[in-house]
Image: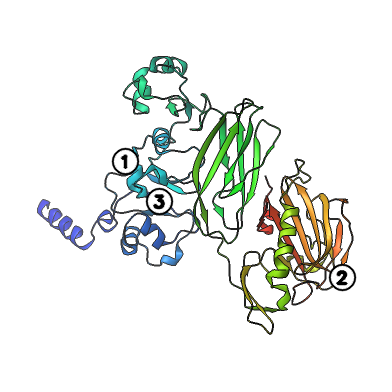
């Protein structure tokens, strides 16, 4: 009987191999929105075929956000491969301390060769064992503070702090460094930023072409004046009422996807300045290309278009310190049935061809067009002050509303004005009528939104609240 059982077991293993042998072991990656098998394979330096084999997948088109995929070929790595979006002040050393994952492993998993590649908005893969959440209590050493003093302040001990933060001694923890201690979410605020900044965060990641970046900063003192740049635009900060300040900045729709500077400046009453700069990742807006448009030559002739563009830019470049709006904007076509019918989207690439000439202009659609005929009502998408009404060559009969904090709405091609400069308008108030004036192929409502001197996607402002 014993020989028979051994023979039966051997035959069973030959005919029915163990499942673990057929499916590669390895850490688990959580699929993110926009991921494909190809992009995941490239990220972890494996082939699509290896991913399919490791996960028993037969149809790569069934990939869905939140799905778990085993990643083969990562010997010694276990648990879940979480995705952390990098924000202001994040560094390899701080992330390594917080997650207790060695810097070398973070670099290997993310195929990075330099800490300078830690861009704001980039996604970092961080392994985490099941049930582990990483350290949350963090603090910053004070000038001249010893490791023993830090341990006492954190209700810990020298050996624990040295081990958790990979310190060789109290002298290796520099003032302004971010250290972690065991325990809960308590502890002194720490950000990896200069002392002038308590915290800084970009709340609209990833930043995209044609998007609105929202930068929220808490200065260490209320007499600090905040400033900075995003790409090449100066930032204007406004108080949120809770000690924090916010800057809203549009990102140009034609800006090439890539890495650009984001700098914060803190100016003290004595004129001294502390600055912090970190590169930020700008991703594609995935804009489409419209069919070629044949228009009257004078409407694309730089002799006419340049002065008009300069006039509009000069109007929308100011930043009124008062914010007139609260909550999301509403569609300016709210009073007629075509309010959800778009004849052209923001950001679409366009080639304008002058009728009867060789004149051509490559550009993009600077707003969103709503379908609708002449005479339909246009409503204010948010409260504000009317700062311009009048006829323009390209834009036709135009109205511009200042919503405050550097945010402006423009309404082009109107058949009739219902407001004048200086009027204070409420959300939903009729400000004009749809028309076909200016450079158009038919009557429609064109709504344009400017944020600190740059046109942005207006529909974003319908779908979320800024700031």
Residue extending furthest toward the front: 303
Q: How is the image coloured?
A: rainbow
CA gap, disc 1 and disc 3 = 19 Å
Indicate left or right for 330 with 357 as reference: right
Mark 1 / mark 2, whichever is N-terminal:
1
N-terminal of the pair, mark 3 or mark 2, is 3
Say which quarter of the image contains residue 31. Answer: bottom left
Picture coordinates of residue 106, whole percent (x, y): 36, 43
- Which residue has dot 2 on it? 375
63 sits to left or right of 456: left
Rendering coords of residue 95 (x, y %): 42, 37
Residue tagged 3: 29
The crowd level at tag 1 (other Cα within 10 Å; few <14, some 14-19, many 20+) is: few
Of badges 3 and 2, nearer the viewer stands 2
Where on the picture, by quarter, is residue 210? bottom right
Look at mark 1 in the image and give the residue it sits on. 104
Q: CA gap, disc 3 to disc 2?
A: 55 Å
Do the CB atoms of the residues marked 3 and 2 lie less than 8 Å apart?
no
């Amino acid at each position: 009987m014993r020989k028979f059982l051994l023979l039966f077991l051997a035959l069973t293993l030959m005919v029915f191999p163990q499942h673990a042998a057929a499916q590669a072991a390895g850490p688990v990656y959580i699929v993110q929105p926009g991921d494909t098998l190809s992009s995941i394979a490239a990220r972890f330096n494996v082939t699509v075929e290896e991913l399919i084999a490791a996960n028993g997948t037969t149809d790569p088109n069934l990939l869905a956000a939140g799905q778990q995929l085993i990643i083969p070929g990562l010997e010694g790595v276990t648990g879940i491969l979480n995705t952390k979006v990098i924000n202001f002040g994040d560094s390899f050393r701080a992330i390594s301390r917080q997650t207790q994952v060695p810097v070398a492993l973070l670099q290997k998993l993310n195929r990075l060769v330099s800490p300078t590649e830690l861009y704001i908005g980039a996604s970092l893969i961080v392994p985490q064992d099941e049930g582990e959440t990483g350290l949350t209590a963090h603090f910053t050493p004070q000038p001249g503070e010893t490791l023993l003093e830090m341990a006492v302040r954190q209700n810990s001990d020298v050996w624990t702090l040295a081990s958790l933060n990979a310190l060789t001694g109290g002298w290796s923890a520099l003032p302004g460094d971010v250290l972690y201690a065991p325990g809960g979410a308590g502890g002194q605020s720490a950000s990896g930023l200069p002392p002038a900044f308590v915290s800084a965060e970009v709340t609209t990641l990833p930043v995209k072409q044609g998007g609105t970046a929202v930068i929220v900063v808490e200065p260490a003192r209320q007499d600090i004046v905040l400033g900075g740049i995003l790409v090449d635009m100066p930032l204007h900060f406004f108080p949120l009422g809770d000690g924090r300040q916010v800057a809203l900045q549009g990102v140009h729709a034609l800006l090439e996807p890539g890495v650009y500077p984001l700098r914060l400046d803190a100016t003290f009453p004595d004129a001294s300045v502390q600055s912090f700069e970190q590169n930020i990742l700008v991703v594609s807006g995935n804009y489409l290309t419209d069919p070629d448009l044949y228009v009257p030559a004078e409407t694309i002739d730089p002799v006419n278009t340049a002065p008009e563009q300069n006039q509009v830019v000069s109007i929308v470049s100011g930043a009124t310190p008062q914010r007139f709006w609260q909550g999301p904007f509403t569609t300016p076509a709210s009073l007629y049935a075509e309010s959800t019918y778009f004849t052209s989207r923001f950001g679409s690439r366009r080639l304008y061809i002058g009728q009867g000439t060789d004149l051509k202009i490559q550009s993009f659609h600077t707003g969103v067009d709503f379908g609708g005929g002449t005479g339909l009502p246009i409503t204010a998408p948010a409260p504000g002050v009317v700062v311009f009404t009048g006829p323009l060559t390209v834009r036709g009969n135009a109205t511009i509303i200042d919503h405050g904090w550097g945010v402006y709405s423009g309404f082009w091609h109107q058949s009739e004005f219902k407001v004048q400069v200086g009027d204070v308008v409420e959300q939903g108030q009729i400000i004009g009528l749809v028309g076909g004036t200016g450079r158009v192929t038919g009557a429609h409502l064109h709504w344009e939104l400017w944020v600190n001197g740059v046109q942005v996607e207006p529909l974003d402002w319908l779908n979320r609240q800024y700031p």
